[in-house]
Amino acid sequence: MLSGKPLVSIISAGMSKFQKHEGLLAREIFTLAIQEAFARCPRLEPKRDVKAMFIGHMGEAYEHQGHMGAILADWSGLLGIPATRCEAACGSSGAALRTGVYAVLSGLADVVIVGGVEKMTNRTTAEVTEYLAMASDYPFEQYHGITFPGLFALMASRHMHDYGTQEEHFAMAAVKNHYHASLNPKAHMQKEITLETVMQSRYVAWPLKLYDCSLVTDGASCVILTKPELALKYTDNPVHIIGSGQASDSIGLYERKTVTSLTSTKTAAKTAYEMAQLSPIDVDLAEVHDCFTSAELIAYEDLGFCKPGESGKLLEDNQTRLGGRIPVNTSGGLKAKGHPVGATGTAQAYEMYLQLTGQAERCQVKDAKIGLTHNVGGSGATAVVHIYRSTQ
Amino acid sequence: MLSGKPLVSIISAGMSKFQKHEGLLAREIFTLAIQEAFARCPRLEPKRDVKAMFIGHMGEAYEHQGHMGAILADWSGLLGIPATRCEAACGSSGAALRTGVYAVLSGLADVVIVGGVEKMTNRTTAEVTEYLAMASDYPFEQYHGITFPGLFALMASRHMHDYGTQEEHFAMAAVKNHYHASLNPKAHMQKEITLETVMQSRYVAWPLKLYDCSLVTDGASCVILTKPELALKYTDNPVHIIGSGQASDSIGLYERKTVTSLTSTKTAAKTAYEMAQLSPIDVDLAEVHDCFTSAELIAYEDLGFCKPGESGKLLEDNQTRLGGRIPVNTSGGLKAKGHPVGATGTAQAYEMYLQLTGQAERCQVKDAKIGLTHNVGGSGATAVVHIYRSTQ
């Protein structure tokens, strides 16, 4: 198997439990992630070594708080370092990870922390829906009342029309991801569900039902990056990032040639695969952006795990379940681990760090060598894909 | 004169007029900046050459619109490229510029657009005040009702107490910057004012009066960066960035050891000067972050243009006025050119591009070779300093 040279190396990672963190501010939740990352990497002296921080944070509205980069630098004990918030809607910390890759490769910052955080459960469902909607187009989408369940329902229903995909196929993704989450102590949902539970849940926006939707959650995550040639100074067990792709698309769904695939995902994946000198067939496991179950199916197709229209079959055959050919969302995914929006991209990288260092416990994919993460902003105006390689 | 090697080169720049852009969305205002930047650089083929975009945008609330990176990529005719919004409050596009430097140096993106935009005049003064306040600390500042005029007034009054600075000194910065703005056709304010006008204006937060405050404005700005070794492919007249520093500080003013200087500015400046192998004395002109006139005085001291407490004297002696030893804010500054918050950092870089290529017309500083920009987020939790060198 060919594969590209390491761009950067992950030397540690941390994640808070994803749940309702009653009474904690985003900054406090982030400390749970950063403390784990520091504890996992005792050879790192954060104050001496860390040279920059990039923070994915989607919404100022939740806590009436912007400027999250500087705040989290301080709350990580790194007062003074350059710290910038990166925002690309739900792809914010994926974009932050990409930015961290730039920073390490630049030579200006040998060790960089990339993370993300969101505090959402302090707001009502109506407020969260409104704040999330800011990631869609104001004049042509929000103004007319459509919100994200509606936008993704348009994509899902067209996929059903074009390919014969059934509501049951979407439901299978939910069942699988709840199963994975039941094995992950940090996931918000800890219980398995049945296909009937999903199918009998109320419609949010046809064909998407309550159990097709990801969770409103509080959470934080981070990874620590360095140059590959410095990685062994900090850990015996780095994970290399060998491919990085990011792409944009029109903010408005109505402007796109197709709504049954995301051009941004395809472009970002192509870039990442080329950089990694790998094909989809080489990927052992993936974390994909299942903000709605239907999005997971479309991601399989856009990432090349199957042909267009065949994602339902992949689920029917249990190929993306733990033990299958290419386990997807072993963490539980956005659907069942939870989707604290700004934290999601680096939470995917956290899962990849655990998996590729053999620390994923009950979620562990055996002999995992190559992993992929896929983080989407909005209805696909941003997509970020990274490819990882184990050094074990 | 020693000076460091170029990090990256600016090959073009653009800026909308800063004013109330009635009926235009932020994305539309940004097209005014990007069109100028493309027109100034006919050898660039944007769709072929530009590999990434970083956009400073401070507030989602103004237009109920996040995800501004992807939107502006599309509206710049660059649909598909990686595009990320960078936010560090009023230092957002300064931080975006720093991020663009990382990206070019990384080798992953040879040509990068860095810009910023804010649409503010569609909101009431009360709304703007509330949205800007998100850059301060929610639990310890916003919650108790203090807004930015109040925070900067605390700094200004302590400076008066410690150093004998007078309200007239602050007023002198306003008079100077209005004079410069009167020479800059893109500035929001086009009229000179007198010291009496400032002194007789109503208090907003003692000692700061209406004419000590920067303007609520709509505007956009951008610069195009590439590697120094590629710059002459695109222009005969690049401007090199030879120093780049960014630093953070506590979000809350109350946590700092001093409020008469910004540690973040000092740290960012030290990094940038060292990288450029230059001292403050080498700087021919600067654009500093005068969100309030008092902030300009403190910037002089933190950037080393004078000793602590001596900034008033610098103004008394007209040393920072056009024709003086070190002209500051020749564009009119935030005070009189206007402060569309997300656009301010790259608007400073735009002014530096004009000055160091001899295109600043009536604002031109003669024989300008070395320039500096200083962009601050919030009350100083972020500061970004860049140093520029002419190639003429």
Image (cartoon, coloured by chain):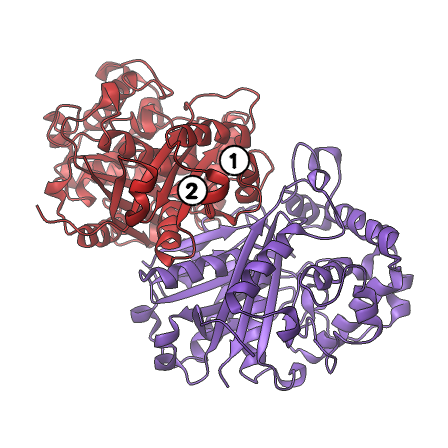
Chain colours: A red, B purple
| Numbered mark located on residue B296 in the image | none
Q: Is residue B244 above or below residue B145?
A: below
Left or right: B196 with respect to A200? Answer: right
In which quadrant of the rendered image does the C terminus of chain A lie? top left
| Residue in front for this viewpoint, A386 or B130 | A386
Quadrant for the N terminus of chain A in the image: top left
Of residues A369 and B167, the one drawn nearer to the viewer in this rendering = A369
Q: Label 1 sits on what residue type?
A: Ser
Whether tag 1 and tag 2 are in contact, CB under 8 A, the answer is yes
Whether residue B44 is visible, yes or no, is: yes
Q: Is residue A246 rendered to the left or right of residue A111?
A: left
Q: x, y percentage for residue A254?
A: 34, 51
- Which residue is identified by label 1? A76
Q: Kindly indicate the quadrant of the structure image that contains residue A62.
A: top right
Kindly state the secondary structure of the residue where label 2 is placed.
strand
Q: Secondary structure at mark 1?
A: loop
Q: Residues within 10 Å of mark 1 (few under 14, many from 20)?
A: many
Question: Between residues B255 and B292, which one lies in front from this camera angle?
Answer: B255
Can residue A381 be seen from the camera position used here? no
Give the residue number, with chain letter if any, for mark 2. A113
Residue located 49% across and 31% down the image: A30
In whole angstroms, how far apart are the C-alphas of marks 1 and 2? 10 Å
Chain of residue at mark 2: A
In the displayed structure, A54 sits above or below A360; it is below
- Please tell me which residue lies in front, B71 or B347: B347
Q: Position of residue A335 (x, y in %)?
A: 32, 27
Q: Position of residue B14 (x, y in %)?
A: 51, 72
Q: Chain of mark 1?
A: A
Q: Amino acid at mark 2?
A: Ile
Is disc 2 surrounded by few (<14), some (14 to 19) or many (20+) residues within 10 Å?
many
**Residue A183 image-quadrant placement:** top left
The location of residue B29, given as percent across then percent down, is 53, 64
